[in-house]
Image: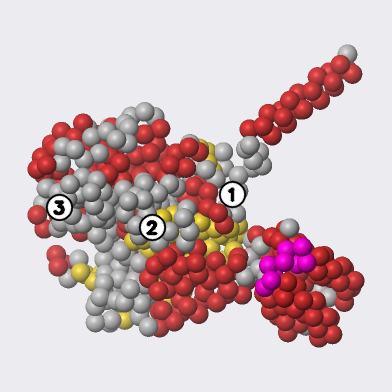
């Protein structure tokens, strides 16, 4: 009986193995976010360290008052740092606060238009549930939206900014309530025929939020909390943060109109404000650590720690360029794609991202399993500050360099660094560098077979010299060597 039971169990394991192998799915657990060394995910530390100088120089040049930066690969946070001040000034004359608030890695930011990708995620959850089709008319759900030539606008056109809406209207000057603001948007005429023109417009995502609220029966903030942020454990992500969190929140602009003064702890965007702080285009507050969890959910094909937010097929849709007819404006459903003006060397055909007017940005590169999040209070104390796009581009580039620099040439720099820290002698360093010079030559020739052959020799040399170097140096160089062999094999 016992033998028969063991045979049945073994057969079950074999069948299960064949099933998973045939499914083409990776059955290993999806990554969760946790801190770790850069070398553990085949990244170099030096390019990551160079990000510090880029951001500090930006603060010195008054591009922003402060910043939090986070980079992660395969779920491992390889850099998480804070710079400058979360709140520093009393007015737009740069009058210093008596007790400025230092930036922290868990500072909460008004992420502005990054809100849009959460609105899109909420919409796609309802799409999965069969509540609408992407080609459905918006007016089918909000009849008054058909006014002034908008009867043919589809939900997909809202999500891809091809509805024909103008970029913006000052709702906060024209209306006094959430209801009035919605009606103002619904009655606004179009600048272009639907589907014929790309124009990034807040009105698209304000309308999309109204559709979500009509279908779900609840306000957008409640829907996002119950179906996205709470299931993901994003406890620092919310609309309308309470007063008790003010000291953790980055201040934004000095707005003397309406006696707002320094806007701190409440939404900066005037249109979101008239919408009670809850809008499809802006209003969300979050931290770098929360946003990387959201990004990892995307990289995990919609799942995080056993909680499924989106189906794999839906994530694939949201990674797809829906606007091939508009070169330079690659866009999926609310995500911008392949925009090197802020994604830098992390940009690529499937690289997803978004920016926010307050100085925030998120970049997700699926092919490299890499996330770069730069949160700044660029508009503190004034929005008349230089654009942070060059800084966004440079820190994304250095994040990419930490991956792409894994070469024999980069390893030589690593050897020099270890030698400078006296983790092995100059004689050991010399022998390692001589070997790597040869490998670098074959890399330049793109001779994969010879690169692999000589790197195997380098690994043997490392083993021979192991007793003459620190354990950290040995393990790091061995990891590098293994990665380089795998890259060329």
Circle number at residue 354: 2
Identify the residue shown where x is 47% and y is 42%.
Answer: 316
Q: Earlier in the sequence, mark 1 or mark 2?
A: 1
Q: Quadrant of the N terminus?
A: top right
Please state the horizontal and vertical placement of residue 220, each as a whole percent of the image. 30, 42
Residue 142 shows in the view: no
Q: Quadrant of the C terminus?
A: bottom right
Q: Nearer the viewer, residue 57 or 405?
A: 405
Q: Write down the quadrant of residue 88 in the picture.
A: bottom left
Residue visible at 27% across and 44% down?
Answer: 157
Circle 1: element type: loop
**Residue range corresponding to the magenta coloring:** 443-451
Tell me residue 110's x, y (percent).
34, 60
Q: Which residue is under mark 1?
A: 32
Numbered disc 2: secondary structure: strand
Label 1 to label 3: alpha-carbon separation: 44 Å
Estimate how packed mark 1 is, as few (under 14), some (14 to 19) or many (20 or more) residues with alpha carbons within 10 Å.
some
Toward the viewer: 158 or 67? 158
**Relative image position of residue 143 (x, y in whole percent):** 15, 33
Q: Is residue 436 above or below residue 199?
A: below
Q: Indicate the position of residue 148 as horizontal and vertical percent values.
A: 9, 43
| Number of the label disc, if any, that sits on residue 191 | 3
Disc sitting over residue 54 in the figure: none
Q: Dominant secondary structure of the magenta stretch? A: helix
């Amino acid at each position: 009986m016992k033998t028969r039971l063991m045979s049945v169990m073994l057969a079950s394991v074999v069948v299960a193995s064949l099933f998973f192998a045939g499914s083409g799915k990776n059955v290993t657990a999806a990554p969760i976010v946790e801190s770790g060394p850069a070398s553990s995910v085949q990244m170099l530390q030096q390019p990551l360290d160079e990000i510090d100088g880029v951001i500090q120089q930006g603060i010195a040049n008054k591009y922003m008052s402060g910043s939090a930066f986070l980079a992660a690969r395969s779920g491992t946070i390889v850099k998480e740092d804070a710079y400058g001040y979360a709140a520093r000034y009393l007015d737009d004359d740069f009058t210093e606060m008596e007790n400025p608030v230092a930036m922290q890695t868990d500072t909460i930011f008004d992420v502005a238009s990054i809100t849009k990708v959460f609105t899109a995620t909420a919409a796609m959850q309802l799409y999965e549930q069969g509540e609408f089709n992407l080609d459905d008319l918006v007016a089918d759900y909000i009849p008054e939206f058909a006014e002034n030539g908008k009867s043919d606008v589809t939900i997909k056109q809202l999500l891809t900014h091809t509805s024909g809406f103008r970029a913006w209207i000052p709702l906060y000057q024209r209306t006094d309530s959430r209801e009035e603001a919605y009606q103002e948007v619904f009655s606004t005429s179009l600048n272009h025929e639907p589907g014929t023109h790309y124009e990034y417009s807040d009105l698209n995502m304000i309308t999309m939020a109204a559709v979500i609220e009509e279908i779900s029966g609840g306000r957008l903030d409640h829907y996002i909390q119950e179906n996205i942020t709470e299931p993901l454990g994003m406890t620092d992500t919310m609309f309308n943060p309470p007063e008790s969190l003010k000291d953790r929140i980055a201040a934004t602009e000095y707005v003397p109109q309406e006696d707002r003064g320094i806007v701190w702890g409440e939404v900066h965007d005037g249109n979101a404000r008239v919408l009670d702080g809850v809008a499809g285009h802006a209003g969300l507050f979050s931290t770098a650590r929360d946003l990387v969890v959201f990004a990892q959910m995307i990289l995990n094909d919609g799942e995080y720690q056993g909680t499924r937010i989106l189906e794999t097929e839906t994530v694939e849709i949201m990674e797809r360029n829906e606007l091939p007819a508009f070169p330079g404006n690659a866009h999926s459903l609310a995500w911008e794609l392949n925009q090197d003006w802020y994604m830098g060397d992390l940009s690529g055909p499937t690289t997803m991202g978004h920016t926010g007017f307050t100085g925030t940005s998120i970049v997700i590169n699926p092919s490299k399993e890499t996330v770069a999040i730069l949160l700044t209070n660029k508009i503190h104390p004034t929005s008349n500050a230089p654009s942070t796009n060059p800084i966004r581009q440079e820190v994304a580039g250095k994040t990419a360099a930490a991956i792409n620099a894994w070469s024999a040439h980069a390893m030589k720099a690593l050897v020099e660094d270890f030698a400078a820290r006296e983790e092995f002698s100059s004689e050991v360093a010399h022998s390692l560098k001589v070997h790597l010079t040869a490998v670098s030559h074959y890399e330049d020739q793109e001779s994969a077979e010879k690169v692999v052959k000589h790197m195997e020799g380098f690994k043997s040399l490392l083993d021979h010299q192991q007793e003459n170097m620190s354990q950290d140096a040995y393990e790091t160089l061995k990891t590098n060597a293994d990665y380089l062999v795998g890259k060329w094999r």
